[in-house]
Amino acid sequence: VFFLFGYRKKISWIIFLTVNLVTQGLLFIWLNSLYTSPLSGDFYIILTMIFAEILIFIVEMTVFLIFVKEHRRLRTAGYVLVANLLSLILGGYLITVLPV
């Protein structure tokens, strides 16, 4: 999605990779910790994922709008919105179909 929105500069990609490794890594750790929790049902995990994606959206929107200067702020905000919606939809789907 980042590439499709026209981001090509090296600094933009470094910011993109850094932010996504941190946010998605923390999301992975958070969701995996739920599997050992007494509250490990699919519904609870999906609810947690939605909450986490909202936090990730806020963090990514802030970081990208401050540090990525390759395009206008509106395009950057659009990228963050589309990427996080797709992540939420795909992640929610995969959680329901992949074996634990």
Image (tube, rainbow, N blue to C red):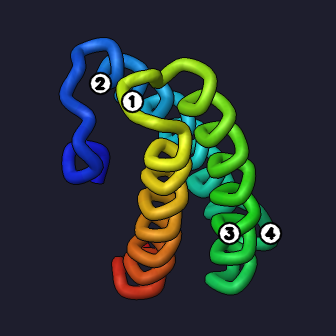
Disc 2, disc 1: CB below 8 Å? yes
Disc 2, disc 3: CB below 8 Å? no
Report the Cα–Cα distance between label 4 and label 2.
39 Å
**Camera-nearest residue between 26 and 63:** 63
Which disc number belongs to residue 45? none
**Residue 62: x %, y % from top left:** 68, 34
Query: Would residue 49 be found to the left or right of residue 10 on screen?
Result: right
Query: Would residue 24 be found to the left or right of residue 66 on screen?
Result: left
Report the Cα–Cα distance between label 1 and label 4.
35 Å
Q: Earlier in the sequence, mark 1 or mark 4?
A: 1
Mark 3 or mark 1: which is in front? Answer: 1
Q: Name the residue carrying label 2.
A: 13
Which disc number belongs to residue 38? 4
Q: Quadrant of the C terminus?
A: bottom left
Disc 4, disc 3: CB below 8 Å? no
- Dot 2, crowdedness within 10 Å: few (<14), some or many (≥20)? some
Three-letter residue code for mark 4 = Pro
Q: Earlier in the sequence, mark 4 or mark 2?
A: 2
Q: Earlier in the sequence, mark 3 or mark 1?
A: 1
* Residue at (54, 19) in percent of width and height: 67
Q: Name the residue carrying label 3.
A: 50
Report the Cα–Cα distance between label 2 and label 3.
26 Å
- Dot 1, crowdedness within 10 Å: few (<14), some or many (≥20)? some
Q: Secondary structure at mark 1?
A: helix
Q: Name the residue carrying label 1.
A: 16
Three-letter residue code for mark 3 = Ile
Three-letter residue code for mark 1 = Phe
The single residue placed furthest to the right in the displayed view is 38
Q: Earlier in the sequence, mark 4 or mark 3?
A: 4
Report the Cα–Cα distance between label 4 and label 3.
19 Å
* Residue at (73, 50) in percent of width and height: 55
Report the Cα–Cα distance between label 2 and label 1.
5 Å
